[in-house]
Image: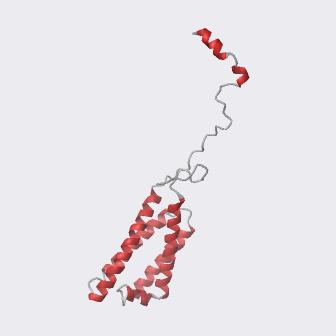
Amino acid sequence: MRYEPQGSPRRGHPDRETDRLARGLGLFSLALGLAEIAAPRAVARSVGLSGREGYVRACGAREVATGIALLAADDPMPWMWGRVVGDAVDLGLLASALDEGPQRRERAGLAMGAVAAVTLLDFAVAKTLSAEDRRPARPLKDYRRRRGFPRPPEAMRGEAREMAGVY
């Protein structure tokens, strides 16, 4: 895992790429949710859930809410875990269609594979975000004005000779 550079306010935390990926998943969630709300019958038919348009619409509302939260939050971590839980709900709903005829089974199986792949990505991003240390990083010490001498150089002249005579 890469870490933010020295001047970053997030120094010591995983890089911004993880946050950017979480925001991208928020956009994906928003688009998917809007499609599920706008055309629940078409979505339900395409994934083998014909007759369960209400469930598809409810899942769409959850996706839209999660997507908005991911895009608006300063800390996307809890919302990424929300996506993981939502994916588990979606997988359970799709699994219910596996026992309803060969065509539905095939469509539901393909949809489950796609949701499982997204679930793995969601889980990886959520786990990475959870590993961040939320405490602010300690400020870096500023050594620009250091000389390496305990006193100004003028005051140090001859000190080595005096110390050599002591030993």
Residue at the image position 33 percent from the left and 82 percent from the top: 108
**Left or right: where 155 falls relative to 30:** right
Along the line of sight, the residue nearer the viewer: 19 or 155: 155
Left or right: 71, with 99 as reference point:
right
Residue 115: percent from left, percent from top? 38, 75
Q: In the image, residue 161 lies at what x, y percent?
A: 65, 13
Q: Quadrant of residue 106?
A: bottom left
Q: Quadrant of residue 121?
A: bottom left
Left or right of residue 53: residue 156: right
Q: Is residue 157 above or below residue 49?
A: above
What residue appears at the point 44 percent right and 63 percent down from the top-left corner?
A: 126
Please name the residue shown 66% across and 33% down the image: 146
Q: Nearer the viewer, residue 146 or 26?
A: 146
Q: Is residue 77 above or below residue 27?
A: above
The spot of residue 131 in percent (x, y) is 45, 55
Residue drawn at 44 percent across, 87 percent down: 40
Query: Residue 41 occupies which quadrant of the picture?
Result: bottom left
Residues 21 and 37: in front is 21
Percent of width and height locating residue 43:
42, 86
